[in-house]
Amino acid sequence: MTVNELMNELFAWCKEEKPFELERTCDTLKCGSGDTELKKVVVTMHATAKLIKEAHEWGAQLIIVHEPTFYDHWEDKLENDPVTEAKTALLEKTGMAVWRFHDHPHKKAVDMIREGNCRALGLTGKIVDAGYYANVTLIPDQTVTVRQIAERFRDLGGDNVRVCGNQDAVCKRIALAFGTPGGVWESLRSPDVDLVLVGETCEWMLGEYARDAGDLGFNKALIILGHIVSEREGMKYLAEILQERYACQFETKYMECGEVYKTCR
């Protein structure tokens, strides 16, 4: 199986339950050849310089990423930029292909990233449309508090999870705004939402609103996960799917790129 064949199968898989078309997509080959035969595939969130070297040492021919490799959503490379040039040279030296898989998994009938997160957290319940871009609400079928959800993310390796607001609030409705979607402000202010889970957002706006809400006695909180933590369980889920479906054709490994921020100790 080649890189092109695998990605086309993944695109078709995303459309099985609910067909869709994208006028424009970032889910394209970023470097390498689509005709490369696959023996080993790496799945990750970001193709960091360190991860590229580790994937190459493992013998991978393809890295499937969820986020940009070159610091721009559409991968428009910075001109005359030494970091961009050095990373390009590194990728060319390895000969590996990098393919982004972002739009299709989010457009899937059941968003793959959301499904992976909920599976990892053990969160089940009814999903309702919040009416905002890339943002839905979960009505959990079990009793869970803000503190318990934050602790679950920490158990999954979220070293920089931050909580604003009432940590002991019982979550009857949870806005799932993984990554950096629109509608987070509207969800936080909604009287029907107790907790908003988001990757990254505006601290002085949403963080302070949630903090004041908690101090004023409202059953309201915001958990800021960091972008990678908020979506990586979905990519781990993809790695599991590839392992199950293609075990006879190539080996798959999820490689951790790590959080972008480190705590100074």
Image (cartoon, rainbow, N blue to C red):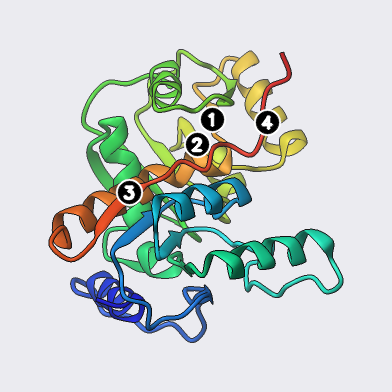
Q: Mark 2 points at which residue?
A: 196
Tell me if 149 is positioned left or right of 110 in this view.
right
Are the residues at dot 2 and dot 1 in contact (C-beta closer than 8 Å)? yes
Tell me where residue 251 sits by quadrant.
bottom left
Q: Earlier in the sequence, mark 1 or mark 3?
A: 1
**3D distance between C-alphas at marks 3 and 4:** 36 Å
Up the image or down, 140 lies above or below 106; here it is above
Tell me if 227 is positioned left or right of 195 in this view.
right
**3D distance between C-alphas at marks 2 and 1:** 6 Å
In the image, what residue occupies the spot 59% across and 21% down?
A: 165
Up the image or down, 211 lies above or below 196; here it is above
Tell which tag, 1 or 3, sits nearer the viewer: 3
Tell me where residue 10 sits by quadrant.
bottom left
Q: Which of marks 1 and 4 is nearer the N terminus?
A: 4
Q: What residue type is labelled 2?
A: Val
In the image, what residue occupies the spot 55% across and 30% down?
A: 222
In the image, what residue occupies the spot 28% across and 64% down?
A: 39
